Amino acid sequence: MSQGQPLQRGALTVQGILEEATALADDGGLAALSMRALGRRLGVEGMAVYHHFANKEALLDALVDRVFNEMALPEGEDWRVGLRARSVSERLVLRRHPWAIGLVESRTAPGPITLAHQDHVIGYLRARGFAGRGSAQVLAFLDAYVYGFVLQELALPTDPTPVVDVVREHEGPSPYPHLDALITEVVEAGYDFADEFDVGLDLLLDAMGALRG
């Protein structure tokens, strides 16, 4: 749909609204998402959106469902492989829609897709030896890791040079010898924080085996 292109009568659909609302949030964050701005993007009056969503809260709940619909579900007999694939997919989706991280955690009226996703993950874990508490812990710990990693990943500067310069701006012996050594041994050796996702995820999955039973 072309942004701002007038729609023919009856052409406005729930899926079309969600598609454009997602694009609007991707471009400018949730602060840019208003019914009026969404109407302009759709080429209709903002009030027209209310024929499909009672209010903005209902729209936000539907957007969370749309985000969960993009995430892969864990499959296969090996729970480590299944959860790893789900976590990798979750990270990619949240990087694609960074506005969704806080939204997913703050909604109090989860939609059917969100509930079905969570239900599937819990059922998957229970079928592979995790009791109720253990399955809840695994899901919570994995989501906390993925969400936290993505937040840090998006916030980190792409160029570490300014930070390096601050650490090394002193003459004589460095007041930060361990940071100085870390820069030499890690940062200047080609360190990329994004590469650490798999390392941390595998460590977490290995530890989660203790929660089975």
Image: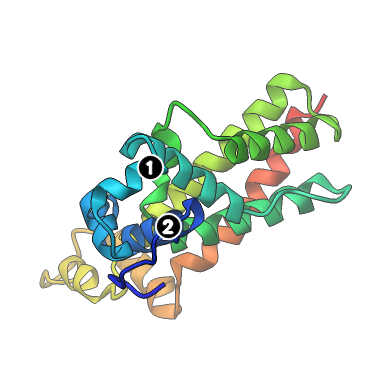
Q: Is residue 173 left or right of residue 203?
A: left
- Which residue is tagged 1? 51
- Local packing at callout 2 (Cα closer than 10 Å; few below 14, some 14-19, many 20+) is some
Q: Is residue 10 above or below residue 143?
A: below
Query: Considering only order in the chain, which callout, 1 or 2, is on the residue closer to the N terminus?
Result: 2
Asked which quadrant contains residue 184, the reply is bottom left
- Local packing at callout 1 (Cα closer than 10 Å; few below 14, some 14-19, many 20+) is few
Q: Are marks 2 and 1 in contact (CB under 8 Å)?
A: yes
Asked which quadrant contains residue 104, the reply is top left
Total marks in image:
2
Residue at x-position 53% and y-position 62% = 92
Q: Quadrant of the N terminus?
A: bottom left
- Which residue is tagged 2? 12
Residue 185, image x and y in percent?
43, 72
Amino acid type at image mark 2: Leu
Residue 65, image x and y in percent?
53, 44
Circle on res. 139: none
Regarding residue 40, the answer to whether it shows in the image is yes
Viewer-closest of 190 and 91:
91
Q: Is residue 125 left or right of residue 66?
A: right
Q: Quadrant of the C terminus?
A: top right
Secondary structure beneath dot 1 equals helix
Amino acid type at image mark 1: His
Residue 106, image x and y in percent?
39, 33
Find the distance from the CA under tag 2 to the CA under tag 1.
9 Å
Residue 2, image x and y in percent?
36, 75
